[in-house]
Image (tube, rainbow, N blue to C red):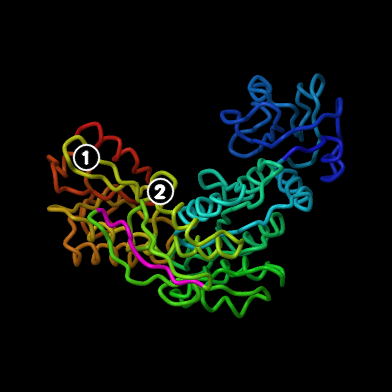
């Protein structure tokens, strides 16, 4: 999004120092900044002002500053009281200048995969921009908005939640026209007093929608379905019931869904390239959004047939030994663990192994982990715990050695909360098999 520095400074209550110029997009990371962007030095564990020189070496056009940094003498900058706050203010100020329809997505599970599928389905007909990785917070969302090309017709953004009021704050910036809620599960429950608190926090998205907007809600999740009473917007539901319905669902040998989707715009067979029964509901949400913004149903389904999702989310890796790894190591909670384990159980395999690490931010960690362990046993899956004894089994130091030789017919799921960093186990399994 191309903006003029002088107007941006005025819009956020900052002071322009140096010659006026235009910039296109923003970044707070010197490793990914592009030529012509505004660099935002965030003051957190590390002070981003120390990296301003690197930002200019990488092509930054100007920077924000809240300190007496030396670069304000020779470069254009906008002086503000707080650079992180100014980043949010800048996106909020720029939002009315965007003509794109904005889709906001939240949920305890499936946000990123649903975002990826929505973007794929809609990009078949509309110029679509979506957040990279999991840019779903007070820094990532503004970066996505301000980085969207000027001709963007549909902007798709995730909205994460780590407490009450956070989604409201993100909605004040993005002002979504369409709000999608995927599910309410046991994620971040310790921060909001349990699963009902999660539902209250997630409902902030539908409460923020304008009366002209549309709330796209999971009819299969009673807490999500109940959010219909909390919004003045129109409501479109999806699931195995609702307005956009999945029926005749089957899974192939890699647990990839095949189903028929019934919608207000007709019915269509759908095949997905990603694994897991739960991905069918994510795809239903994508089709609901695509139909709402005028994408032809057959066109959307064709796009979903080849669409992938972001890394470390039900990512199937074929090993040289003939075994398969399901890398779902990006994050975990009991709800997403259940979906991943059920997908593993549905895959053609002679031996199924789950390498599981700790699930964080649960209000009752012991119950959450015991429940997952019980499901693993009931599905006939071998459990290898790493970094925690909460699953009721002693954790292993070397899961690769504990698993032993692998060959055709072996499938290994690797999953834990982000803090566990279990992608290292995936790397080790690939290297040794």
Residue at image coords 68%, 34%: 41
Q: For numbered disc 1, what is the local secondary structure?
A: loop
Q: Is residue 240 magenta?
A: no
| Range covered by the magenta-colored residues | 254-263
Q: Which mark is residue 145?
A: none
Instruction: Quickly name the residue at label 2.
Output: 306
CB atoms of marks 1 and 2 within 8 Å: no
Q: Is residue 241 left or right of residue 59?
A: left
Q: Position of residue 208 (x, y in %)?
A: 68, 67
Residue at image coords 62%, 60%: 167
On screen, residue 302 above or below 132: below
Mark 1 Cα shell of 10 Å, populated few (<14), some (14-19), many (≥20): few
**6 or 218: which is nearer to us?**
218
Instruction: Quickly name the residue at label 1.
Output: 398
Q: Quadrant of the N terminus?
A: top right
Mark 2 Cα shell of 10 Å, populated few (<14), some (14-19), many (≥20): few
On screen, residue 99 above or below 405: below
Q: Position of residue 273 (x, y in %)?
A: 36, 51
């Amino acid at each position: 999004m191309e903006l003029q520095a002088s107007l941006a400074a005025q819009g956020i209550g900052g002071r322009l120092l140096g010659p006026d110029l235009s910039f296109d997009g923003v970044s707070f990371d010197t490793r990914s900044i592009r030529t012509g962007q505004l660099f935002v030095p965030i003051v957190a564990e590390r002070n981003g002002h120390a990296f301003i020189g690197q930002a200019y070496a990488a092509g930054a056009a100007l920077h924000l500053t809240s300190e007496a940094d030396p670069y304000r003498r020779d470069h254009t900058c906008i002086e503000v009281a707080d650079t992180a706050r100014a980043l949010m203010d800048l996106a909020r100020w720029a939002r009315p200048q965007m003509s794109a329809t904005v889709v906001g997505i939240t949920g305890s599970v499936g946000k990123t995969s649903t975002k990826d599928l929505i973007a794929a389905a809609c990009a078949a007909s509309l110029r679509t921009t979506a957040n990279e990785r999991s840019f779903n917070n007070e820094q990532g969302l503004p970066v996505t908005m301000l980085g969207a090309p000027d001709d963007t017709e549909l902007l798709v953004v995730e909205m994460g939640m780590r407490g009450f009021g956070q989604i409201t704050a993100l909605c004040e910036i993005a002002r979504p026209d369409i709000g999608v809620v995927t599910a309410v599960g046991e994620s971040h429950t310790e921060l909001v007093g349990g699963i009902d608190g999660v539902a209250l926090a997630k409902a902030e998205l539908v409460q923020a929608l304008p009366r002209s907007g549309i709330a796209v809600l999971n009819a299969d999740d009673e807490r999500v379905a109940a959010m219909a009473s909390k919004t003045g917007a129109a409501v479109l539901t999806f699931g195995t019931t609702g307005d956009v319905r999945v029926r005749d669902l089957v899974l192939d040998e890699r647990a990839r869904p095949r189903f028929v989707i019934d919608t207000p715009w007709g019915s269509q067979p759908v095949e997905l390239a990603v694994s897991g029964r739960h991905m069918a509901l994510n795809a239903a949400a994508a089709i609901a959004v695509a139909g709402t913004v005028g994408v032809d149903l057959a066109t959307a389904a064709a796009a979903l047939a080849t669409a992938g999702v972001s890394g470390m989310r039900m990512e199937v890796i074929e090993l040289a030994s003939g075994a398969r790894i399901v890398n779902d190591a990006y994050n975990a909670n009991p709800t997403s663990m259940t979906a991943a384990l059920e997908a593993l159980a549905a895959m053609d395999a002679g031996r199924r192994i789950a390498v599981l690490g700790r699930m964080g931010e649960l209000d009752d960690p012991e119950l959450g982990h015991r429940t997952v362990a019980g499901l693993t046993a009931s599905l006939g899956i071998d459990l290898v715990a790493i970094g925690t004894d909460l699953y009721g089994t002693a954790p292993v130091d070397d899961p690769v050695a504990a698993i032993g030789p692998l060959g055709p017919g072996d499938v290994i799921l690797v999953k834990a909360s982000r803090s566990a960093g279990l992608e290292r186990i995936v790397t080790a399994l690939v290297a040794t098999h």
